[in-house]
Image (cartoon, coloured by chain):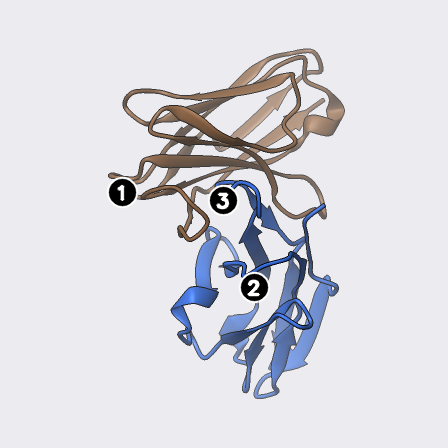
Chain colours: A brown, B blue
Amino acid sequence: DSGVTQTPKHLITATGQRVTLRCSPRSGDLSVYWYQQSLDQGLQFLIQYYNGEERAKGNILERFSAQQFPDLHSELNLSSLELGDSALYFCASSVSEGGGETQYFGPGTRLLVL
Amino acid sequence: AQRVTQPEKLLSVFKGAPVELKCNYSYSGSPELFWYVQYSRQRLQLLLRHISRESIKGFTADLNKGETSFHLKKPFAQEEDSAMYYCALPSLYNFNKFYFGSGTKLNVKP
């Protein structure tokens, strides 16, 4: 599958813990986006990287951080988890950067904080 | 603050009926607007984008700058159109930052 992949699919953890979500973009895509989707909410933009550099930041909590590695995969780190962090986390990739780019989405990681 | 509004959480129509999914945005300028769709058990995927001006699966969307709207329309809905639809646009200040609406669930009844 040459599409966007995300691991793990599901994650159950406890409050106060730290987790890492992983995203591999489509082959050739240089840009990676992270979104959070809570219950009954739309996708909330978290952060975007292009070729290893952070290019845009949304309302991402200080407890959250991300990076894009030289092989272009990205990781989203969530720490000191709270119940409200339970959500679906999507990763998307695009060939380049900019407002006109089509984003290709991964299947998402469902995080449940107990 | 920039915003994308999809006022309907759920829209139910009968097969063969026209459908219009509303999207309004707060933006001063000429935005690039997108409609993304998520069918059951599938990933979110691009349905159409303003700049392409093409019709996908019979859907069209017209940008109305006066009303700041980008409504998605189809003259005759099909059962396979049942899905979640999201309107999206990039930030005016950083084109890499995207705003998505809260989504409209379209249910096409037989």
Left or right relative to A110: residue B102 = right
Instruction: Identify the amino acid type marked 2.
Output: Ala
Q: Residue at x 42, y 75 (%)?
A: B57
Image mark 2: chain: B
Please indicate, yes or no, whether residue B39 appears anywhere in the rendered image: no
The percent coordinates of residue B18 (x first, y second) are 61, 85
Residue at the spot of label 3: B95
Q: Where A39 sits versus A80, above or below?
A: below
Amino acid type of the residue tagged 3 in the rendering: Phe
Residue B63 screen position, x and y as percent:
56, 71
Name the quadrant containing residue A2.
Answer: top left
Residue in view at x 50 percent, y 21 percent:
A66
Q: Dot 1 lies on which element?
A: loop
The answer to which of B93 and A34 lies nearer the viewer is B93
Chain holding disc 1? A
Instruction: Give the quarter of the figure containing the N terminus of chain A.
Output: top left
Quadrant containing the C terminus of chain A in the rendered view: top right
Give coordinates of residue A45: x percent, y percent.
Answer: 58, 38
Discs 1, 3: same chain: no
